[in-house]
Image (cartoon, rainbow, N blue to C red):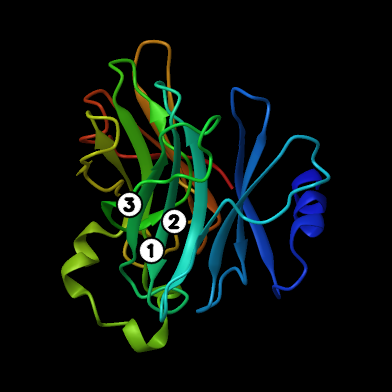
Amino acid sequence: MLLTLLVSTIIAAATSVAPPSSVVTADDQVWMGVTCDASTENATLEVYKSADLENWGTPVIKVAEADKSVIGGYLFIAPDGKLQLYYTLSSGAYDGEGVIYMQTCQDPVAAPSFWSERVKVGVGCVSASPVVMPDGGLCLPAALWGASCIDEAYKTAHPELDERRGAFAYVSRDGGATWTAGTSVNVPERLHANYNNPRVYASPDGTLNLVARSCDSGFLYKATSKDGGANWTLPDKFMQ
């Protein structure tokens, strides 16, 4: 509710808005990513910062591309203090593929408006910020959504991705410069369902846990990985 109220003070022109994430940088500035016209073929992403949650000003960075829709917009403060932004570009609301990108602000305190060129992470939809693994690597949860979420014009556009549909994770060992995709979490509805909210967290012993929601069945599943997100166990259904 608080994020929704804050977003309403930031932007009023869009037909719908969604606040994917927020972070606080070392200078006590609150940063917020806002998806405008969310879940449409015209969605864009704007990132704002504020010291008092009342005066947001103009976007620090805006992601918009002709004939593309932005999905998500997740902020993350890396262990080295750099500010990272993760989002997906898709043709239409969802084209069955999507491409995840990352951009970095090297110094969000001294140079908040200076952002790098975007780095391609891989295909899929990002749905959360990454987590830092015990060895210092980054694990980014992602998903290739199933048929129930693909725009009609793209239903058969990417058959080569069907075996990968479901929730999975990308792993980076170099701070986000390069990424490797792990195997998909094989839940029963994998080829059809929308895995809209995969999240990853690390247990104290270093085991990674991926929780994914199947929108078609309404169940939450959890899988684990002991090899840094490269492979996942068969998931347990634990909550409806």
Residue that lies at the very extreme toward the top in this rendered image: 205
Camera-side mark, 1 or 3: 3
Pointer 2 with pointer 1, Cβ within 8 A: yes
The residue where tag 1 is placed is 145
Q: What is the number of the mark on residue 156?
A: none
Judging by the rendered image, the residue that carries numbered circle 3 is: 117
Element type at mark 2: loop
Q: Earlier in the sequence, mark 1 or mark 3?
A: 3
**Rendered location of residue 10, percent (x, y):** 75, 57
Distance CA(mark 2)–CA(mark 3): 28 Å
Residue 29, image x, y percentages: 67, 32
Q: Which residue is mark 2?
A: 195
Q: Mark 2: which amino acid?
A: Tyr
Q: In this rendering, is residue 45 above or below 154?
A: above
Q: Quadrant of residue 205?
A: top left
Q: Is residue 198 left or right of residue 187?
A: right
Q: Residue shown at 42%/28% (left/top)? A: 78
